[in-house]
Image (cartoon, rainbow, N blue to C red):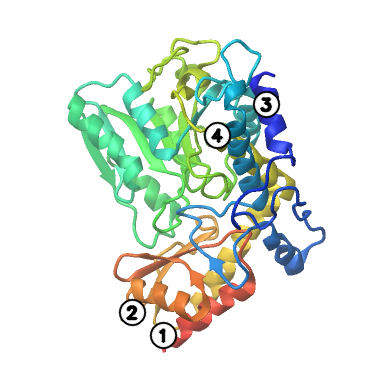
């Protein structure tokens, strides 16, 4: 069978040998729970059963890594097992499945991703994560001494490292626009970026959502103004896809990259890079393999990465299908609702400082806050010890709460109870 048939068969089969241990709550051959119907909090309580995390534990760190649904985990593991069982049947002449990842175009999968972000599949490359995407662009553009690159002062390390290296390598000028904390004025951010622009400015590379604070930048306005000035724009969407609406055509960026193992809930090691169709054919590929000159499908030539784990690709497709089955708007609405629910109640507690934005258009599922006189590490520790809640400490004074569809109101209420006690 060809690779496509093999992946589809192994992803859907229930005939694999039993898996050892209790890694899957639904053991081989068992039926996964159906998606619930209805509305309201009861719907989300039922949907929580789609995730293998134990009841009584709440995970609030999606901004680092999303929790995989059972169906994603099961299809990924079953595919890995099927590969192990089929090794002797493989060859390179079409009569057996090919076990190498990185040499396939994955057209159907890239089309599904294209529907998520409103892009043609040929503009999309599959990567390992957001850091890869940024580096592919930073090493693929033709850069010259004296060119200027503008980041912000709140970049993730994977978002700025590539440009710091490019500046050092090519003699470029590296600049950082200041984003205030908290930020509640979109125009202030726009002004801070463009006051750094000169005739030598070549690239503006900023986050769609800032990782540390969950701030949603006014990227459409930034990209429109940059386009009018002939400046290349690339957005760090590591925290955006599956979290908030992402339409690269409406945004108007030249390039966009993301990690899909965060808010889209895919297995770790799945990312994407989008580059606009009139630019992607001109981008040098950082990892050159057999198809590095393929101009008919430039996204495929940027996808080439040698031998990898094709089971992660199966898991990625399962995550996209799960996201679509629940409903993208429903997912994003739930995330926004829970984020607003948390922030509104935090604002009522004396002694709590919210470092995230509270502007309705600049916040969603990430909230970073702190309690006067209490370290973020201690607050994280107490949440786990007292109620089995797991957010993430961010330095000495802050903690970051990321909410997703596997979180419930009563879990947020439990966190708020601890915050009130420690603030008092």
Q: Within 10 Å of the Cα at label 3, are there few (<14), some (14-19), or many (20+) other Cα atoms?
A: some
Q: In the image, is residue 242 above or below residue 295?
A: below
Q: Residue at x 82, y 58 (%)?
A: 37
CA–CA distance in space, label 1 to label 4 = 43 Å
- The picture places residue 193, in percent across and down from the top left corner, at 33, 43
**Would you say the residues marked 2 and 1 are in contact, meaning their CB atoms lie under 8 Å apart?**
yes
Disc count in the image?
Answer: 4
Mark 2 vs 4, N-terminal side: 4
CA–CA distance in space, label 1 to label 3 = 55 Å
Give SS at disc 4: helix
From the image, state whether disc 2 or disc 4 is nearer to you: 2
User: Quick one: 186 or 247, which is closer to the camera?
Assistant: 247
Specify the farthest residue to the bottom: 424
Give SS at disc 3: helix
Q: Could you tell whether 211 is left or right of 21 in the image?
A: left
Q: Could you tell whether 30 is left or right of 269 in the image?
A: right
Name the residue carrying label 2: 374
Name the residue carrying label 4: 248
Q: Residue at x 57, y 16 (%)?
A: 91
- The picture places residue 122, in percent across and down from the top left corner, at 57, 20
**Residue 234 sits in quarter:** top left
Mark 4 vs 3, N-terminal side: 3
Name the residue carrying label 3: 6
Residue 132 appears anywhere in the view: yes
Q: Within 10 Å of the Cα at label 2, are there few (<14), some (14-19), or many (20+) other Cα atoms?
A: some
User: Quick one: 338 or 229, which is closer to the camera?
Assistant: 338
Name the residue carrying label 1: 422
């Amino acid at each position: 069978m060809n690779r496509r048939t093999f992946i589809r068969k192994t992803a859907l089969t229930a005939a694999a040998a039993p898996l050892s241990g209790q890694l899957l709550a639904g053991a081989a051959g068992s039926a996964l729970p159906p998606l619930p119907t209805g509305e309201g909090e009861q719907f989300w309580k039922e949907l929580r059963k789609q995730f293998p995390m134990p009841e009584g534990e709440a995970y609030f760190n999606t901004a680092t890594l999303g929790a995989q649904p059972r169906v994603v985990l099961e299809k990924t593991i079953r595919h890995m097992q099927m590969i192990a069982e089929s090794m002797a049947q493989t060859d390179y002449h079409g009569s057996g499945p090919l076990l190498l990842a990185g040499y396939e175009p994955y057209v159907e999968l890239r089309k599904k991703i294209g529907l998520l972000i409103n892009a043609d599949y040929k503009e999309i490359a599959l990567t390992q994560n957001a850091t890869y995407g940024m580096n592919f662009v930073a090493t693929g553009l033709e850069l010259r001494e004296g060119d200027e690159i503008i980041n912000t002062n709140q970049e993730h390390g994977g978002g700025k490292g590539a440009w710091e290296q490019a500046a050092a390598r090519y003699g470029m000028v590296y600049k950082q626009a200041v984003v205030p904390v908290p930020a509640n004025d979109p125009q202030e951010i726009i002004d801070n970026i463009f006051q750094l622009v000169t005739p030598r400015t070549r690239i503006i590379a900023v986050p769609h959502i800032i990782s540390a604070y969950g701030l949603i930048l006014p990227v459409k306005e930034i990209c429109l103004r940059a386009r009018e000035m002939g400046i290349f724009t690339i957005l760090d969407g590591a925290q955006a896809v599956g979290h908030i609406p992402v339409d690269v055509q409406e945004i108007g960026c030249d390039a966009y990259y993301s990690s899909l193992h965060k808010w889209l809930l895919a297995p770790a090691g799945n990312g994407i890079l989008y580059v606009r169709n009139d630019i992607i054919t001109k981008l040098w590929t950082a990892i050159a393999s057999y198809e590095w000159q393929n101009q008919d499908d430039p996204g495929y030539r940027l996808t080439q990465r040698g031998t990898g784990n094709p089971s992660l690709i199966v898991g990625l497709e399962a995550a996209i299908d799960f996201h679509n089955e629940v409903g993208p708007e429903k997912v994003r609405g739930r995330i926004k609702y829970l984020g607003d629910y948390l922030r509104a109640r935090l604002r009522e507690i004396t002694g709590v400082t919210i470092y995230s934005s509270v502007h309705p258009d600049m916040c969603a599922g990430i909230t970073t806050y702190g309690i006067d006189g209490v370290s973020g590490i201690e607050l994280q520790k107490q949440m786990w010890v007292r109620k089995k809640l797991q957010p993430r400490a961010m330095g000495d004074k802050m903690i970051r709460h990321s909410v997703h569809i596997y979180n419930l109101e009563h879990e947020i209420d439990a966190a708020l109870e601890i915050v009130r006690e420690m603030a008092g």
